[in-house]
Amino acid sequence: MNKLVAFVLIALAAATPAAQARVHSVLPFQSLEWPLGGEAPNFLAAAVAIDGDSIIVLADTEHPAETVPRTRVALLYRRGTNGSWAYSRTLTQVTALPAELRAELAMKNNLAVIKIHRDIATIWEKTGGNWVQATVANGLREPGSFAISTSRILAGSSGCTDDGLIYEKSAANGNWVITGRIPPDAGVCANQPRAVELNYDYAFIRSSPALVRSYRKNGSALPWVANRTINLPSQASPFPGPVAVQRGTAVAPGSAYFTRSTNWIYSGQLMPIDYPSGTGDARSVLFRDSVLLATEGWDAQGSQFVPYVYVQNSAGGFDHVGILQGVGRFNLDFDISGRTIVASSGTDHNGPGPDDVWIQGFVTVYVLPATLVTQPAIANNFDARDISGLTLSAGSGFALAGNSSNYILRQSVAARDTAALFTNSNWQGFQYIGADITPRSWDLPDSWNGIAVRYVDENNYYFAGKRNATTFVLGRKVNGVVTTLAEEEVSDLPAISIQRVELSVNGTQLIASLAAGDVGAYLQAEDSSLSQGRAALVTHRGRADYDNVYVAPTASIRLLALQFPTNAVGRQLTYVSGDWRMSFNPADRGLNQQDPGTNSFAIAPGPAIDNQSVTTDAILNAFGSTNPVASFGLVTRWTDAQNHYSLSVRSSNSLQIRKMVNGTLTVLKGITWNVTPGSTHRYTFEARGNELTASVDGIVRLRAIDNSLPRGQYGIAAYRTTARFLSLDARQP
């Protein structure tokens, strides 16, 4: 058994991790169709690019053996007035052996460069709404990648005669000519195609896995002069693509970013919200129109690669704001123009035979939300007795009820329809609301009690709820007319019982669920009647109690899912003190904390986030002390050992929610609780807004209100206790 060395990552110990915005799950807007017929079984595109209302896709008409010629085409798609994309025409094509084909593509500012064969590339100009092939004096034959800025094109060479060539359109005859040269790196012929980036008067040449050189235009002189260097960290070495540059910031494959000064200064690493799962070493990057795209892998084995979306924050770092969904298992290429993204991806499949392997391809268009940095989610379990964030409809009976152990919001009027609107929830795109609802009565056969999204007014909203005692319904009310979109009988559910009802809308997709004990229902529908509005608690001629309401502008995101020790992939936990050992032995299988005399933590590395739900399956081995009281459990919103919240299972036969702020400990809530050594229990600790909730084996045991710590990391803890942890799961709810 090997002892895990206790350590704190230097980068995390040096400063509090940067705060992280909520992350959108961006659904596909449209999948592009393969337009040419033939034997191509799917749309596996080698490269894609977008500029305004035009997309170019490089793909093969079929995929025969490597010794058989194939035809590679450059397909043009155009966006119509209705926003949908359709095939326009084939710009160029070539038939050749696969070894002779290339897939280099750049598109920007009404210009495009296409290279589908090793011997020549073509330049295209958008003129009068049409794409027209331009004339290039002496041809364009550089073997590297391309970049476009303003009206210039940079072509990467091989580092022998040049590292790159600048092309511009001649005012004299309209031909594209060489107007700049990037000299080879120290005169060395590397004979390797250069990956390049162009940003106004500055060219960036990746001349080795560890070095990017920048050059600047030197008046009217043909050679551009050496300017600065970017020294790349080791994470970039396996990923040979270009850096991405915008507004004095450069981002490299491997996720490092740099700030321009007298030289390029390393400033930090991209830190996606699920960094503990293994993301944060971007395979490729693109920085355009104030949006950074990066291909991220989800675990140490790199089983999946999808595009993540980042925006630069006021501190010069980057906030992770989006994940593109439904793009296959591995991303091949992507591009962005404005708020529209095109992505090429594939998924490999295994057939019945040992050699029967095939890849399904996709070319997908996405439209990013208008607001990428979202507002915070809203949590209200009413224990703070604060409903100032709600707007109540006229004549409604919404009022606080209950006692200090649990307050609720009760709607007591059944003579009319009622609504309690969350004032700051008018979000376009995605919207979610969940609530514990206890129906009290129904006045009419079609009465219901529930929740709503995109609530515009009393005559326009989507809703989900329990209709009388027997039916779970998903519906809409538009211009006062109620339409049932989906429904399911739930007659085996007690009429008066606590039911968790959830409703979300993403674009035109509506999903509703109901859960009460072992009984549940799930409904979904498509509808485009309403595009925005608020989230709300609503009743139609019924009475109900509401509790534990959560309203979010983004979908739930899984941050980490570890089963110790079988699939402990991703990034190593940060061990702060203690003796943490991973064991595969049946007798003590899992992650063991074996030092009975320390205050020890195992923290998931990554950015500081606000709302978090953390779960572990844990087994107490032995408390090492009763004076002082020993404990084990979970921590949320962790900054360091002096600042965090904890769910504490204690040797004093108690269960507590505690806070540590600047080294001062406060017990926020506690109950009598006894845990037996050797027994396995599932512990969940949630921090939503200022609400803290502790659950054991799926049952809420404690709730507390506190405003001290708005965000942080999460993990597991033990104080003078030996314990075994079988899992660590975390989500941003």
Image: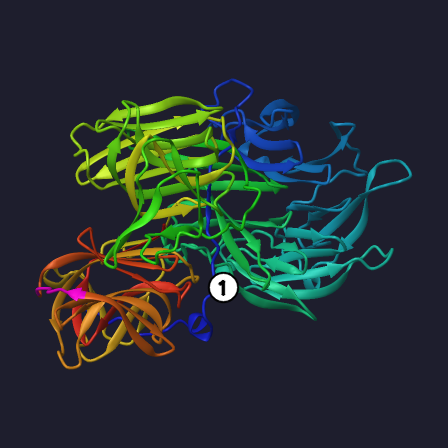
User: Magenta span has 673?
Assistant: yes
Residue ID for mark 1: 234
Kindly tell me whether residue 329 is visible in this rendering. Answer: no
Q: Is 167 drawn above or below residue 541 in the view shown? A: below
491 or 303, which lies in front? 491
User: Magenta span has 367?
Assistant: no
Q: Which residues are magenta?
A: 671-676
Q: Is 170 drawn above or below residue 684 in the view shown? A: above
Kindly tell me whether residue 61 is visible in this rendering. Answer: yes
Q: Position of residue 388 (x, y in %)?
A: 44, 52
337 left or right of 508?
right
Q: Position of residue 323 (x, y in %)?
A: 46, 45
Residue under the image location 48 percent in, 64 percent down: 18
Dot 1 amino acid type: Ser
* Mark 1 element type: helix
Other-residue count near label 1 (Cα within 10 Å), few / some / many at <14 / 14–19 / ≥20: few
Residue under the image location 61 percent in, 37 percent down: 49
Q: Position of residue 343 (x, y in %)?
A: 53, 38
Residue 520: quadrant of the picture:
top left
Residue under the image location 63 percent in, 53 percent down: 191
254 or 429, which lies in front? 429
472 or 418, which lies in front? 418
225 left or right of 171?
left
